[in-house]
Amino acid sequence: MAGKSAVEIEKWAEEYLINLLDLCMELGVKVVPMFWGAAFGLELAGGYPWGFWKGADYDLLEEGKERFVKKTSRLRQHARKLGLFLAHEIHPGTAAMCGDDFNLLVDICDGDACLAVNADPSHCWEGESWETRFLKVAPRIYACHVKNFVIRPGQALRKMEPAWQKRGMQFVDISSGDLNLIRYAELMIHSGYPQRYCKVMRRDTAPLVVEAESAYRETDATSAAGIRFVRDNLCFPIAAGSFEEGMGA
């Protein structure tokens, strides 16, 4: 497909995704994790400070809104027909890079019920905390990653550094990063994620999916350590009532 026109490539990709959704339905996978592309263009994906997004004869933000609604229309319609949820991972360089961006997409799509969030706290390192982000989109969280990172003091987060071990932000093994993942798991409970997932997928439990990525530790070792950490620290009996209720009784 690489040698074909952009129109042909886009048509092929749309059909591919339609077929993927059909296969997910056959497998009973109702929550489909995905990234949405930079629908607003690389200018907006690059963010501040070069915000030359609007002029006398153009408005990149408004054009991007129209583009996103139009180009996702068939996919969203098909997902709704099948009862699927398209779970976007809010991530730098995508159509929704923060909680506000995601809610904007929901608004311009008239609150489309198929638009969902695949929570991942390891991409909250530019001012928006993971708690702020996921409280903003809480009713839309249908999938959940567990991943960790560190910020190296004094290092620029956006510098052009190809070597992972020299970057200002580095993904690390789950147990040793800057994030308190026990608090994160509690926030997922607070958001209603477990109940939402269990209802849609008809399961008794909701998964905490370990995403293994480390600048130093080998991938399989990172995965194994992450699974142990989730098992030992993030899977716990959920309180059935409050301390005050117990005292009152």
Image (cartoon, rainbow, N blue to C red):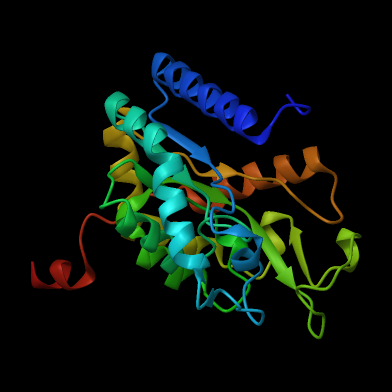
Q: Is residue 212 above or below residue 106?
A: above
The quadrant of the image that shows the N terminus is top right
Residue 114 location in percent, x, y?
33, 40
Number of disc labels: 0
Q: Is residue 17 above or below residue 142?
A: above
Left or right: 4 with respect to 247?
right
Residue 63 location in percent, x, y?
47, 60
Identified at 64% across, 66% down, the residue is 43
Q: Residue furthest bottom?
A: 154
Name which quarter of the figure residue 142 lies in.
top left
Left or right: 124 with respect to 207?
right
Left or right: 173 with respect to 191?
right
Whether residue 59 is visible: yes
Whether residue 203 is visible: no
Name which quarter of the figure residue 210 lies in.
top right
The quadrant of the image that shows the C terminus is bottom left
Identified at 50% across, 59% down, the residue is 96
Q: Is residue 59 above or below residue 105?
A: below
Identified at 62% across, 50% down, the residue is 229
Q: Residue furthest left?
A: 249
Q: Residue furthest front?
A: 57
Left or right: 175 with respect to 90?
right
Q: Looking at the picture, tell me which residue is in the foreground, 175 or 239.
A: 175
Q: Looking at the picture, tell me which residue is in the foreground, 149 or 99.
A: 99
Q: Looking at the picture, tell me which residue is in the foreground, 194 or 23.
A: 23
Residue 234 location in percent, x, y?
50, 52
Residue 84 location in percent, x, y?
35, 31
